[in-house]
Image: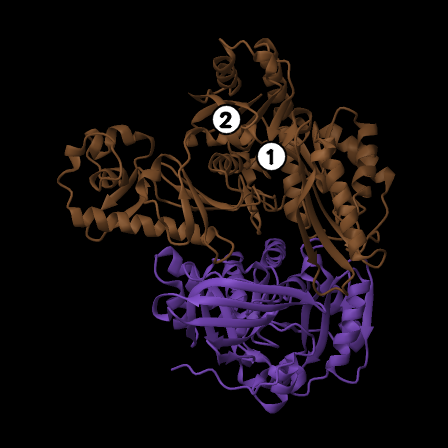
Chain colours: A purple, B brown
Amino acid sequence: MWHISEDDLESIAIGAGILGTGGGGNPYIGMLRARQMIRENGPVKVLSPNELDENDNIVCVGGIGAPTVGIEKVRDKQSYYALKAIEDFTGKKATAIISNEIGGSNSLEPIIPAALAGLPIVDADGMGRAYPEVQMKTYFVYGVPSYPMAVCDEKGNTALITEALDAKWVERMARSVTIQMGGVACYALAPMTAHQVQTTAVLDSLSLVKRLGDAVRNARTIHEDPIEALLNVHPGKVLFQGKIVDLDRQTTAGFARGQVVIEGMDQFESDKLTIEFQNENLIARLNSEIICIVPDLICIVDSERGEPITTELLRYGFRVTVLGFPGPDLWKTPEGLATAGPSAFGYDVEYSTLELT
Amino acid sequence: MHIGIDVGGTNTDAVLMDSDVLVDKIKNPTTPDVTSGIISCINTLISSRSDVDQIDAVMLGTTHFVNALLQRRELAPSAALRLCLPATTMLPPLIDWPNDLKNSIGGHTYMARGGHEYDGREISSIDEKELRKIANQMTDEGVRSVSICGVFSPVDGSHEKIAAEIIKSETPDVNITLSSEIGRVGLLERENAAMLNACLVEVASKTVAAIRTAMLSAGLNVPLFFSQNDGTLMQSEFASHYPVFTIASGPTNSMRGAAFLSGVLDAVIVDIGGTSTDGGMLIRGFPREAAVSVDVAGVRTNFRMPDVFSTALGGGSLIKQNPLTIGPESVGFKLASEAMVFGGGQMTATDIAVANGMAEVGDLRLVSNIEKSFSEDTINEIQKRVEDVVDQVKISAQPVPVVLVGGGSILVRNSFDGASNVLRPPDAEVANAIGAAISQVGGQVEKVYSLTDMSRDEALDLAKDEATQKAVEAGGDPKSIEIVDIEEIPLTYLPSNALRVKVKAVGNLI
């Protein structure tokens, strides 16, 4: 058990940005909101998944909506209202909050309802990275129902989804309601038991992102290589190092799709890496060979400072290091791959594991 | 003829231009009160001229306003009003401002009903009684300047205008800044930018008035223009209401002046100074803008500012051996006493350049003991670092012209990786003032259009018309107005109904 302090927020934002694989949205607003909650309510307690017991009732929260609206109509206490709506509907109080997505600013969303309700957060999440759609959570792949779900806006509206054929339907309904609410909302869903969390969640992910962020910040202070510091914390590899020479980025059907081409430098001179993305980075090809593919993580960071770079901020000339991390095992089963593997993104390619040696 | 003036941190430069021809130039130290330095430059340029009546405008670029922010002085007691309720209350206005800056302007903040959704629907209606009450509270607090920011005002600015009328009717003497006229989508950044403007309007009015008075007393009864961040001019009346648009005019003018002197519209401009090297990309004659948020005096904003890449490398950079290091420390303005070539004891980049035969500065004999191989290696390393700046600034792999300005340009050779050619224009030391003098006027529009009500072409036409209109209002000759840039940004995660369009129109001053 530990407590999230104000200083931890910067580390979490950096680590969550790295595991966000290019998506997850701008972390600045998320950080400000979490900081405000901690300032008003004190540090938030974090429970390890194995500290949960049979009396626990864990509710998942997250933000949903367009990042471009999220930076303008900045979110408020919606996830707290959504938590209350789930508690009212089920007649059961939550004893802890869990994140839907550790990649990006959703890593910090649980802090809001946790601080306001005086509850702890569980050190775990439903993705171990970032993904664009609600059904892409490990909880649902392994049998946790995706309903009830409460979606709330800032005006006092609550939409409650009480039943759905599957999690993909929950995504459709929630997305539609979110757009009507003005493009941003927060939700609470899927009350879980300790056992469900322990067996279907990506465990220890919040402490992982904090350690990643701590390592980067520490390395910067003592003028050591932040990339090396990252890889000491979490097994992965440097897939590539170079300079962005081409960027093709369009928005179709609600996603920023495209590819980025990186020309190699130093030991990667005379090589080329191409990464295709749909908000999140999905496939990395070295020259023409696939070397990393979803659900494994492809993370673009600034070579000098180790700062994660989101898809919308990529630019010609940036000196970047591309890191590969193995995705959580929960995503590599047939059911996991069917939900969020290459085929779920329209790629007719078999998944193959990232080679670390 | 035009007079262009640039007031920098160290020097005030001024030039007299006859259309495209440089007629005269002068450089003086900047004075603490700013205006006397400007006037003495003007007087130098016009004294003993018989054609002063041919001068029909003065253009001015200055860091005076950004310095007021940096030094927290001469700022007006100001209030930030956000039209948003019930939304966005967790992060009130000014939440991430440095405390000393917030305190120096009083730090008054209010949130009221109003604001819009991304598609133009209201979040809530304006409550007139609520706003009148706020206006009275502002009067009680001694507020003299107000910024009004409505959620999604770049989509629909009507609430900001209505609120301004209500506030004005209760407190007629207060200055009002509307965020939709200052910044773009991004609530906190735009609100911050509007608030920075609000606290500068008083010092802006005073400064503009002082310069105008002094110009008149020097016999120049002509329009006065100020350079904006985007490389265009604004009339002095406009500048007294929107001083925040001058914040990045220094680098902008330097880039445009360098481009003009070299005759290219698409180039990388590299300014190698005493301590640092700044690189910027010029596209179609205008500096490329930074994509991300820009920090001004510790406050996060999303201004359209030139994207400048800087590295600590300049003529005064200290050189150390074993291992070779270049900078970041520099002797700065003490070059003339501390560098080896001038009899000082510090090995600087300038000494290396002289030892390598790349410049004739100071006394060559004083650096004769520097090993040839060492000075060559150092020059190669310096060249690589500057080439790296060029590469970071370029927007594609295509070779582009590189224009070198600044005293430190002696440090580099005439051929660069990534450059199609390297230009070192004469008169580069007054590039900033020239940039101010050759500026055109412009109009820029950045708005979100809902494509449920209109087609993409209709949205683009609306934006182009509005930008053209703004350029004409700024003093542009309608026959010369050209659309120089169009950018379309569809909004992600929304049904493709919302399109963000950015259009810039530019023309010659009538």
Residue A356, given in percent of the width and then of the height, sits at 41, 81
Residue A328, given in percent of the width and then of the height, sits at 53, 81
Q: Decide: few, some or many residues near mark 1? Use Cα within 10 Å; few <14, some 14-19, many ≥20.
A: many
Query: Where is residue A84, by image quadrant?
Result: bottom right
Residue A55 visible? The answer is: no
Q: Which residue is mark 2?
A: B7
Mark 1: which amino acid? Gln
Q: Which circle's residue, 2 or 1, is located before the other in the chain?
A: 2
Q: Relative to A195, is A212 on the left or the right?
A: left
Instruction: Confirm or deny contact between disc 2 and disc 1 (CB under 8 A).
Output: no
Q: Residue furthest left?
A: B369
The correct choice, above or below, for B208 with respect to B49 in the image is below
Q: Secondary structure at mark 1?
A: loop
Q: Secondary structure at mark 2?
A: strand
Q: Decide: few, some or many residues near mark 2? Use Cα within 10 Å; few <14, some 14-19, many ≥20.
A: many
Q: For the residues tagged 2 and 1, is the chain the same?
A: yes
Front residue of A103 and A286: A286
Residue A317 visible? The answer is: yes
The correct choice, above or below, for B273 with respect to A58 in the image is above
The quadrant in which the N terminus of chain B is found is: top right
The quadrant in which the C terminus of chain B is found is: top right
Q: Which residue is mark 1?
A: B228
Q: Chain of mark 1?
A: B
Query: Where is residue A137, by image quadrant?
Result: bottom right
Front residue of B255 and A112: B255
Q: Chain of mark 2?
A: B
Front residue of B67 and A284: A284
Residue B98, given in percent of the width and then of the height, sits at 55, 41
Q: Relative to A159, is A257 on the left or the right?
A: left
